[in-house]
Image (cartoon, rainbow, N blue to C red):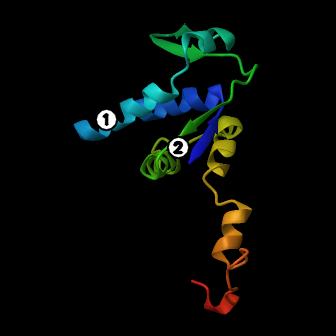
Amino acid sequence: MDLHLDHTQRLNLHFLMGSQRGSVDDVRFWWRLQDRIELSEEEKREVNFRTVKVGELDQPMWDLRPELVRQFEFSTDELNRIEKLLKEWPQGFSANDRRWLEPLLKQFEPSVVDIAKVNGSGANEASVQPRHRA
């Protein structure tokens, strides 16, 4: 399945993936995904990516415009793990995250076409009465 990710989603996902703890295999899994979604140097220049010292920490910053959207293909296992990462992030999210998080989560929801097939509304499928659906 493909995910369409803008640069803000990619930067935030990159951070979340890099914050994961686990076995060597788990960490290497996240590193591979980080490498795939990382912004190129050219993309970083386009969105004015920079780090600013805030106290003792370097805080990443970037411009919200222009939105750089790219399509990425992920396996079912990769998508399931990304979805779980987002839905079970222990530090939680704030209202400020809605701008990038909500459109990303919507991509994990079944489409109307998928729901129609499950409900037996596809071209060559028999309908199942609601009382008999699981």
Instruction: Check contact, mark 2 vs mark 1: CB within 8 A.
Output: no
Tell me what residue is drawn at x 63 percent, y 74 percent: 118
Which quadrant: the C terminus? bottom right
Left or right of 129, for residue 76:
left
Relative to 47, does residue 105 appear above or below in the rendering? Answer: below
Relative to 46, does residue 20 appear above or below in the rendering? Answer: below
Q: Nearer the viewer, residue 70 or 105?
A: 70
Tell me what residue is drawn at x 62 percent, y 15 percent: 43
Relative to 121, does residue 92 appear above or below in the rendering? Answer: above
x and y, in percent, of residue 15 in the image:
48, 28
Residue 62 image-quadrant placement:
top right
| Residue mark closest to the camera, 2 vs 1 | 1
Question: Can residue 19 be seen from the camera position used here?
Answer: no
Q: Amino acid at mark 2?
A: Gly
x and y, in percent, of residue 125 in the image:
67, 80
x and y, in percent, of residue 95 in the image:
68, 40
Q: How far, Cα to Cα, is label 2 from label 1?
A: 21 Å
Left or right of 95, for residue 39:
left
Question: Residue 92, which numbered label?
Answer: 2
Tell me what residue is drawn at x 55 percent, y 10 percent: 41
Q: Secondary structure at mark 2?
A: loop
> How would you rate the neighbour count of disc 2 (Cα within 10 Å): few for under 14, some for 14-19, many for 20 or more?
few
Q: Nearer the viewer, residue 33 or 60?
A: 33
Which of the two discs, 2 and 1, labels the residue nearer the N terminus?
Answer: 1
Question: Residue 52, which numbered label?
Answer: none
Tell me what residue is drawn at x 69 percent, y 90 percent: 129
Q: What residue did someone put label 1 on?
A: 27
